[in-house]
Image (tube, rainbow, N blue to C red):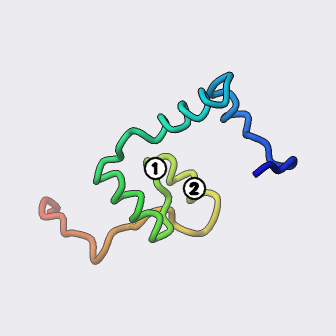
Amino acid sequence: MNADWLTAHEAYRRLGRKEADRQSAYRELFQAAISGNALAEIRDCTHKGWALGGERFRAQIEALGPRRAASKGVGRPKKDHNRV
């Protein structure tokens, strides 16, 4: 399929000088396996609409609008048995 309006992204073109080199380098980007925990976290955040990232990133996302970027947890807060 040859579409005159369709062009490769600059980041893709930087993967190699020849098309075969670029294709090979692009395939290598997806060779690393994602751990089960990371995949579960990605799925959980995706399904629930939460931001995926560290505390600082989530705080930045929350500052952009009225919606929380992560769950506060389920249920009541745990009692602090050390309080007097």
Instruction: State yes or no: discs 1 and 2 in contact (Cβ < 8 Å).
Output: yes
Q: Is residue 16 above or below residue 64?
A: above
Disc 2, SS = helix
Point 39% across, 65% down: residue: 44
Residue 4 rendering spot, x and y as whole percentages: 87, 47
Q: Earlier in the sequence, mark 1 or mark 2?
A: 1
Numbered disc 1: secondary structure: loop
Q: Which residue is mark 1?
A: 53
- Residue at the front extreme? 1
Question: Tag 2: Cα neighbours inside 10 Å, few (<14), some, or many (≥20)?
Answer: some
Q: With respect to residue 2, does 42 lie above or below? A: below
The reply, left or right, for residue 84 in relation to residue 39 is left
How many numbered marks appear? 2
How would you rate the neighbour count of disc 1 (Cα within 10 Å): few for under 14, some for 14-19, many for 20 or more?
some
Q: Amino acid at mark 2?
A: Ile
Q: Residue at x 47, y 64 (%)?
A: 46
Q: Which mark is residue 37?
A: none
Q: Nearer the viewer, residue 64 or 47?
A: 47
Amino acid beneath label 1: Gly
> In the image, what residue occupies the spot 38% across and 67% down?
72
Q: Quadrant of the C terminus?
A: bottom left
